[in-house]
């Protein structure tokens, strides 16, 4: 399993950092987790074919996790060169940002053509025999999810955005052995003693911090967290275009 970060910024895009989006690749199949970045260009930068995208999976309908879908959908649907592309897009609700564009959201509801929008419920939302995604309810919004991604015998947890001070840190993180946890770093200070204890209880050897607001979780704070958990896991801060192999 290969994970490519297209965007790692928090709610605001910053220099050299788009908002949240990552691609999980298994063989030549691509699975996109969140689309807060301009994925139309970024996928091509990484030489990922649109015809190989198996699905786009949105953790919640904040713009920094899905606004890239507007541009992506308009271009996919508007140009004949993309005929034959079929990409399901899984959202936890009816994607309110897309309603801003009547081309995408008409009287019949969301379009269902080259891209087709599907509203998912908690639980297993996708399984194509190669990769499975389980959506786990969290408390970041009234309709936000974390994702457990399983493929090739490996398990990766994408926390998505969580509630401040992580009362909703997914139980799976401490109940199952995970190969990687991708944790957000915008809503909770990672060096608070009680937070470090919660995260240290995770059953993983590697945690990647993305969606980090570096004025809230400074390099020094992350370093304090890294030292605290060093005997259990390595901690990495992801940047745009970083690639990790699981
Ligand atoms: Zn966010
Ligand atoms: Zn959010």
Image (cartoon, rainbow, N blue to C red):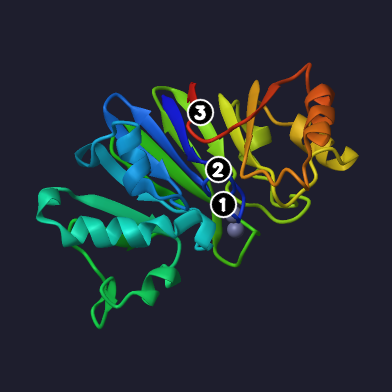
Residue 74: give x, y in percent of width and height: 26, 62
| Callout 2: SS | loop
Residue 51: give x, y in percent of width and height: 19, 40
- Inter-mark Cα distance, 1 to 2: 6 Å
x 47%, y 25%: residue: 243
Quadrant of the rendered image containing residue 4: top left
**In which quadrant of this rendering is ligand 1 seen?**
bottom right
Q: Is residue 51 left or right of residue 88?
A: left
Residue placed furthest toward the bottom: 107
Residue named by callout 1: 13
Q: Are marks 1 and 2 in contact (CB under 8 Å)?
A: yes
User: Relative to the observer, which residue lies in front, 181 or 73?
Assistant: 73
Residue 164 in sight: yes
Residue named by callout 2: 17
Q: Earlier in the sequence, mark 1 or mark 3?
A: 1
Q: Are marks 2 and 3 in contact (CB under 8 Å)?
A: no
Residue 154: give x, y in percent of width and height: 47, 24
| Callout 1: SS | loop
- Inter-mark Cα distance, 2 to 3: 11 Å
Nearer to us: label 2 or label 3: 2
Residue named by callout 3: 242
Residue placed furthest toward the right: 193
């Amino acid at each position: 399993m290969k994970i490519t970060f297209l965007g790692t910024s928090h709610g605001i895009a910053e220099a050299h950092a788009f908002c949240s989006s990552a691609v999980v690749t298994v063989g030549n199949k691509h699975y996109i987790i969140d689309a807060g970045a301009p994925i139309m260009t970024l996928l091509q930068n990484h030489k990922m074919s649109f015809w190989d995208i198996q699905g786009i999976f949105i953790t919640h309908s904040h713009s920094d996790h899905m606004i890239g879908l507007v541009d992506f959908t308009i271009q996919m649907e508007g140009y004949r060169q993309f005929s034959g592309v079929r990409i399901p897009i899984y959202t936890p609700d009816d994607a309110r940002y897309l309603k801003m564009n009547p081309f995408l959201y008409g009287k019949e509801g969301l379009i269902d053509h080259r891209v087709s929008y599907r509203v998912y419920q908690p639980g297993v939302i996708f399984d194509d025999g190669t990769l499975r995604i389980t959506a786990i309810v969290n408390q970041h919004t009234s309709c936000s999810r974390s994702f457990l991604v399983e493929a090739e015998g490996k398990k990766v947890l994408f926390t998505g955005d969580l509630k401040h001070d992580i009362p909703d840190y997914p139980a799976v993180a401490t109940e199952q052995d995970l190969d990687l946890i991708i944790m957000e770093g915008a809503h909770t200070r990672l060096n608070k003693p009680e937070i470090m204890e919660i995260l240290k209880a995770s059953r993983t050897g590697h945690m990647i911090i993305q969606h980090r607001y570096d004025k809230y979780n400074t390099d020094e704070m992350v370093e304090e967290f890294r030292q605290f958990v060093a005997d259990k896991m390595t901690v990495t801060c992801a940047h745009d275009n970083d690639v990790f192999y699981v």
